[in-house]
Image (tube, helix red, strand yellow):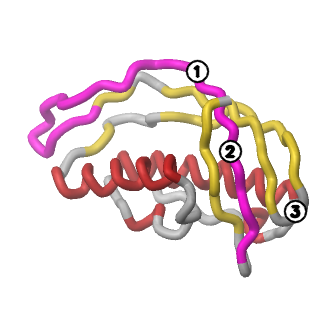
């Protein structure tokens, strides 16, 4: 199911930034399982290379008519690290599930292995919303 943009994520607060990060990863899951490359547009800042790469995967899935058959990842924890009301950094715990990537015929074309990830995620407040500007190793 396509995730709804949370009302909390529209607030220029720490809680709003956390809600936006959770939404970003829910949108990423959706984009890879549907697949739908459009949902990720404008969620990442143009300086976020990881965002570009994740979005490129969604675009590739659409182009090849492939998708993930189960939830690729889930945010399991978010801890505020530093920042101000415009730029914030969080330590984000992510559980990557074992997930198969399949063709339109149902053939398995790739498998992501299960693992636990720790990422530094940066967000920046724009005119009226948050954007991811960093996803890096934590």
Q: Judging from the image, what secondary structure is the residue with disc 1 in?
A: strand
Instruction: Tell me the quadrant of the picture where the C terminus can be found.
Output: top right
Residue occupied by mark 1: 116
Instruction: Name which quarter of the figure residue 81 lies in.
Output: top right
State which quadrant residue 135 falls in: top right
* Left or right of 22, for residue 88: right
Q: Crowdedness of circle 3 by 10 Å Cα count: few (<14), some, many (20+)?
A: some
**Camera-nearest residue between 38 and 86:** 86
From mark 2 to mark 1, how far is it between C-alphas? 15 Å
Give neighbour class at mark 1: few <14, some 14-19, many 20+ (Cα, 10 Å): few
Q: Residue at x 36, y 46 (%)?
A: 33
x, y (%) of residue 94?
61, 31
Relative to 67, residue 56 above or below:
below
> Who comes first in sequence, dot 2 or dot 1?
1
* Residue 121 - label: 2
Asked whether 105 falls inside the magenta stretch, the response is yes
Labelled pair 3, 1 in contact (Cβ < 8 Å): no
Question: Majority secondary structure of the magenta segment?
Answer: strand
| Part of the protein shown in magenta | 101-126
For the residues marked 2 and 3, what is the alpha-carbon distance in whole angstroms? 16 Å
Q: Dot 3 corresponds to which residue? A: 13
């Amino acid at each position: 199911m396509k995730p709804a943009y949370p009302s909390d994520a529209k607030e220029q607060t720490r809680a709003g930034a956390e809600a936006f990060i959770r939404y970003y990863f829910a949108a990423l899951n959706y984009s890879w399982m549907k697949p739908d490359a459009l949902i990720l547009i404008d969620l990442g800042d143009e300086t976020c290379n990881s965002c570009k790469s994740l979005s490129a995967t969604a675009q590739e899935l659409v182009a090849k008519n492939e998708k993930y058959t189960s939830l690729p990842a889930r945010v399991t924890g978010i801890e505020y690290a530093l920042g101000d009301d415009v730029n914030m950094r969080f330590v984000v715990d992510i559980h990557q599930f074992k997930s198969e990537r399949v063709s339109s015929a149902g053939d398995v074309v790739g498998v992501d292995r299960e693992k636990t990830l720790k990422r530094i995620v940066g967000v920046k407040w724009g005119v009226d919303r948050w954007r991811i500007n960093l996803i890096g190793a934590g």
